[in-house]
Image (tube, rainbow, N blue to C red):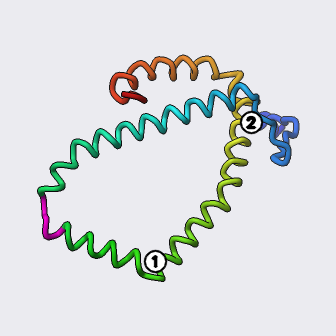
């Protein structure tokens, strides 16, 4: 009895993750533009929420608000807190190049392997979603 009829022999396949393809310049520019618009949308939404909630928070809990303000001022003078902030800032600065390298590797892999198959569909979907986002969550006022 032949045991290979259920599991046919396939040629060996290997993928080397050492050599990640570089992303196209056009893809990087498109990504950066979309990221910029996304951050503008978030900042616009934040300012709208802040403007709507601001008057409400001024009237609520004035006693609690002063206690929170005093606590924050005390915390800002605490040397342990300041050192933790410095460590966190340093870690973020050290991680930034790694995040950028990972982003470029992801864009390269997407551009080389995925984009040829789903790029047009994804572009059409993003274009159609932008119409609704411009109404609900515009990038600029």
How far apart are the two marked residues, 2 and 1, measured between alpha carbons? Answer: 40 Å
Q: Residue lying furthest bottom in this view?
A: 79
Where is residue 64? Give x, y as percent: 17, 69
Question: Residue 95: x percent and y percent?
Answer: 66, 59
In the image, residue 111 lies in the stretch drawn in magenta: no
Q: Residue at x 41, y 28 (%)?
A: 140
In the rendered view, would you say 59 is above or below 75?
above
Characterize the magenta stretch by its predominant secondary structure. helix
Residue 63 screen position, x and y as percent: 13, 70
Q: Is residue 31 left or right of residue 82?
A: right
What is the magenta range? 60-64
Q: Secondary structure at mark 1?
A: helix
Q: Disc 2 on helix, strand or loop?
A: helix
Name the residue at 76% across, 29% down: 24
Taking the spot 28% from the left edge, 42% from the top edge, the residue there is 49
Q: Residues within 10 Å of mark 2 (few under 14, many from 20)?
A: many
Tell me whether the residue at label 2 lies in contact with that at label 1, contact meaning CB atoms closer than 8 angstroms: no
Q: Which mark is residue 108?
A: 2
The residue tagged 1 is: 81
Quadrant in the picture for the C terminus = top left
* Residue 111 in the figure: left or right of residue 18: left
Mark 2 or mark 1, whichever is nearer to me:
1
In the rendering, at what x and y percent does residue 65 appear?
20, 66
The residue at 46%/17% (across/down) is 128
Q: Choose the circle earlier in sequence order: 2 or 1.
A: 1
Image quadrant containing the N terminus: top right
């Amino acid at each position: 009895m032949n045991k290979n009829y259920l599991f046919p022999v396939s040629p060996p396949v290997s993928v080397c993750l050492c050599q990640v393809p570089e992303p196209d310049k056009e893809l990087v520019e498109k990504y950066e533009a979309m990221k910029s618009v996304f951050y503008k949308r978030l900042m616009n939404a934040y300012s709208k929420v802040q403007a709507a909630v601001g008057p409400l928070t001024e009237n609520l809990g004035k006693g609690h608000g002063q206690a929170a303000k005093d606590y924050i001022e005390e915390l800002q003078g605490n040397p342990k807190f300041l050192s933790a902030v410095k460590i966190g800032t340093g870690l973020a600065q050290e991680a930034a190049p790694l995040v950028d390298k990972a982003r470029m590797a992801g864009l390269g892999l997407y551009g080389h392997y995925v984009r040829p198959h789903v790029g047009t569909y994804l572009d059409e979907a993003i274009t159609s979603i932008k119409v609704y986002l411009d109404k609900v969550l515009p990038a600029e006022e």
